[in-house]
Image (spheres, rainbow, N blue to C red):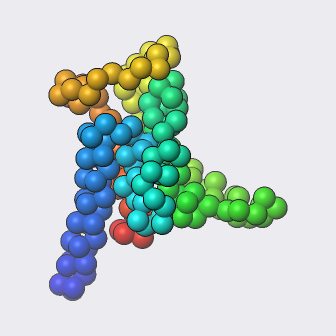
């Protein structure tokens, strides 16, 4: 039995590493979606810049429109890179993939109450302008984004078989 405990500790450390890496990327100024997807570049065999460009529009709940949380979008993109389908005629693969995405969304929502950015941030229905806020200590104190990024990275790590 000690082997299992050691293995569980090692897996937990790996998950913590990816969560922390995603949080660190977010705190360096990358948006929520970029931070989650880019934390898994090696596992997904994509280069860092490509991950950043693909995920850039999804920050702030889709271009700061406060729709689906960017961390959730990053998690979905990672799932697509790892387990997505390519054949448009393969309805079974589509259904399996959508089931996976819905499961990931449910896990995130169960922990955080929503997958919608404006709801997670406690904002009204107005759309923010395109200019992001400056990242200051106060910014990080008043928003749960770093923690949401970390949690999305944890779910992604579990999905990648690092659980």
Image coordinates of residue 97 in percent, x first then y, are 63, 59
Q: Nearer the viewer, residue 86 or 54?
A: 54
Quadrant containing the C terminus is bottom left
Image coordinates of residue 54 in percent, x first then y, are 53, 46
Note whether 75 is above or below 9 in the view shown.
above
Quarter location, residue 4? bottom left
Task: Note whether residue 28 is visible.
Answer: yes
Residue at image x 20%, y 79%? 6
Q: Is residue 104 left or right of residue 136?
A: right
Note whether 51 is above or below 137 in the view shown.
below
Q: Nearer the viewer, residue 26 or 89?
A: 26
Residue at image x 21%, y 77%? 5
Image coordinates of residue 136 in percent, x first then y, are 21, 26
Q: Is residue 8 left or right of residue 52?
A: left
Q: Nearer the viewer, residue 83 or 25?
A: 25
Quadrant containing the N terminus is bottom left
Q: Nearer the viewer, residue 81 or 102?
A: 81
Quarter location, residue 114? top left
Residue at image x 70%, y 58%? 95
Q: Is residue 16 left or right of residue 118?
A: left
Q: Is residue 67 left or right of residue 160?
A: right
């Amino acid at each position: 039995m000690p082997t299992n405990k050691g293995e569980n500790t090692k897996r937990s450390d790996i998950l913590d590493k990816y969560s922390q890496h995603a949080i660190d990327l977010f705190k360096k100024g990358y948006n929520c979606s970029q931070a989650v997807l880019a934390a898994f570049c090696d596992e997904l065999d994509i280069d860092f810049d490509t991950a950043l460009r693909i995920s850039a529009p999804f920050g702030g709940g889709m271009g700061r429109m406060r729709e689906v949380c960017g961390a959730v979008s990053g998690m979905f993109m990672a799932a697509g890179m790892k387990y997505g389908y390519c054949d448009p005629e393969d309805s079974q693969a589509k259904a399996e993939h959508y089931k996976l995405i819905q499961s990931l969304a449910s896990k995130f929502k169960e922990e955080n109450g929503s997958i919608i950015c404006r709801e997670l941030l406690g904002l009204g229905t107005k759309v923010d302008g395109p200019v992001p806020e400056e990242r200051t200590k106060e910014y990080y104190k008043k928003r749960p984004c770093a923690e949401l990024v970390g949690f999305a990275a944890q779910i992604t790590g579990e999905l990648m078989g690092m659980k």
